[in-house]
Image: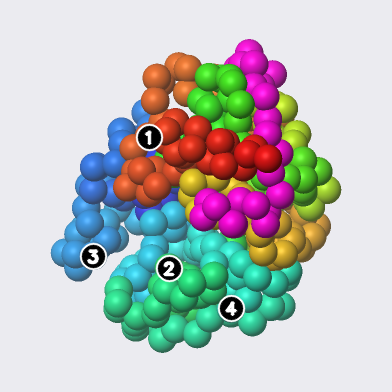
């Protein structure tokens, strides 16, 4: 099996590469070489997907049985990439996001939920960010999905729509922040109730499902999340305490109080958001097609081991928005616990 991965040096793209090589596949990666090192054993092609000459040079290294696009974002560019690769591959796996849904994050979602509309030739400025509603990122990914389907058709296209993806190599820093904070111990603000269900998917399980779809020739659209019954916020933080050896005192604060004091959802308190739809994504179609999800505690454990081994999480512009500063947390604790 010959596989082309667009990207292939960070998080999901890297995980797909690692698993494919372990399965004996021949892997080509195409990237600019700026976000990380290529996995040993790949055929690494340097180039920018936005540059036509680089795409033409990439095409000289085909054909491949399948392509995994872990870096597509701009519809116009995704359309160009798909057109170049269409004669050279049988299947295009596009990694999208639940942000393509018009109801995200407010409403519970399934693959039949309405999707944002964006032209297949839309540029990077298409779409808008609406508070607690659609985002430009969602519009761009929706247009990119449509671009792939226009070129490859439904029978040769697999679209994966993950929700929150955690695990070793996470560059946004949501789980790494919680791990470090719990390891430091002391009084920690946590979003009540502890039995709030969450359904992040492990990057390794997402990567395995992408390769499984290629191997079985599975096409279609799939939400990719853990089952809604898989874990809770309390279980997540307990796992953080167990693996780090920290001595935390969790101060469980109701949503209303957190909002009252201006705590920013999703960023200052990572993985916390009040809307019903955030952790109500139906992924039964993917589970029926072979997706399996490991226990949440295993994701927490392995992410901590990765952090300890590397000394730091991967840097990314979004990581600067994650978590409280110690000063901010102490101020909030004083306000929240004040009689």
Residue 210: horizontal and vertical position, in percent?
59, 52
Q: Nearer the viewer, mark 4 or mark 3?
A: 4
Q: Disc 1 on helix, strand or loop?
A: loop
Measure the alpha-carbon separation of dots 4 and 2. 12 Å
Residue 312: horizontal and vertical position, in percent?
39, 25
**Residue of label 4:** 102
Please tell me whether residue 246 belongs to the stretch shown in magenta: yes
Q: Residue furthest top?
A: 245
**Residue of label 1:** 314
- Residue 152 as seen in the image, left or right of residue 71: right
Measure the alpha-carbon separation of dots 3 and 2. 18 Å
Q: Residue furthest left?
A: 53
Q: Which residues are magenta?
A: 241-263
For label 1, the crowd category at 10 Å Cα-Cα, with few meaning under 14, some 14 to 19 and many 20 or more, is some
Residue at image location 32% in from the left, 47% down from the top: 317
Badge 3 or badge 1: first in the primary sequence: 3
Q: Disc 2 on helix, strand or loop?
A: helix
Badge 4 or badge 1: first in the primary sequence: 4
Q: Which numbered tag is attached to residue 50?
A: 3
Q: Which numbered tag is attached to residue 137?
A: 2
- Residue 222 as seen in the image, left or right of residue 167: right
């Amino acid at each position: 099996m010959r596989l082309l991965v667009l990207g292939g040096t960070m998080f999901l793209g890297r995980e797909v590469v690692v698993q494919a090589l372990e399965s004996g596949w021949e892997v080509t990666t195409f990237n600019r070489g700026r976000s990380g090192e290529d996995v040993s054993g790949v055929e690494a092609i340097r180039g920018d997907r936005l540059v036509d000459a680089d795409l033409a040079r990439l095409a000289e290294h085909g054909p491949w049985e399948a392509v995994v696009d872990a870096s597509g974002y701009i519809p116009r560019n995704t359309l160009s990439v798909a057109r170049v690769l269409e004669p050279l591959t049988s299947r295009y796996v596009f990694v999208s996001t639940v942000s393509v849904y018009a109801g995200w994050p407010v409403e519970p979602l399934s693959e039949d939920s309405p999707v944002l509309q964006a032209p297949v030739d839309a540029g990077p400025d298409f779409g808008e960010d609406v508070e607690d509603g659609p985002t430009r990122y969602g519009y761009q990914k929706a247009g990119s999905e449509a671009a792939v389907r226009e070129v490859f058709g439904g029978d040769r296209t697999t679209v994966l729509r993950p929700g929150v993806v955690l695990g070793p190599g996470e560059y946004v820093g949501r789980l790494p922040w919680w791990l470090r904070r719990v390891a430091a111990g002391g009084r920690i603000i946590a979003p009540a109730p502890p039995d709030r269900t969450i359904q992040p998917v492990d990057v390794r399980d997402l990567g395995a499902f992408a390769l499984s779809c290629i191997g079985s020739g599975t096409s279609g659209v799939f939400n990719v999340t853990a089952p809604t019954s898989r874990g809770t916020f309390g279980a997540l933080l307990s796992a953080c305490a167990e693996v780090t050896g920290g001595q935390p005192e969790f101060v469980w604060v109701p949503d209303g109080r957190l909002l009252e004091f201006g705590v920013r959802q999703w960023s200052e308190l990572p993985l916390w958001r009040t809307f019903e739809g955030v952790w109500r994504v139906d992924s039964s179609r993917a589970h029926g097609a072979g997706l399996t999800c490991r226990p949440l505690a295993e994701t927490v454990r392995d992410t901590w081991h990765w952090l300890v081994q590397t000394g730091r999480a991967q840097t990314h512009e979004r990581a600067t928005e994650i978590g409280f500063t110690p000063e901010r947390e102490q101020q909030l604790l004083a306000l929240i616990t004040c009689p």
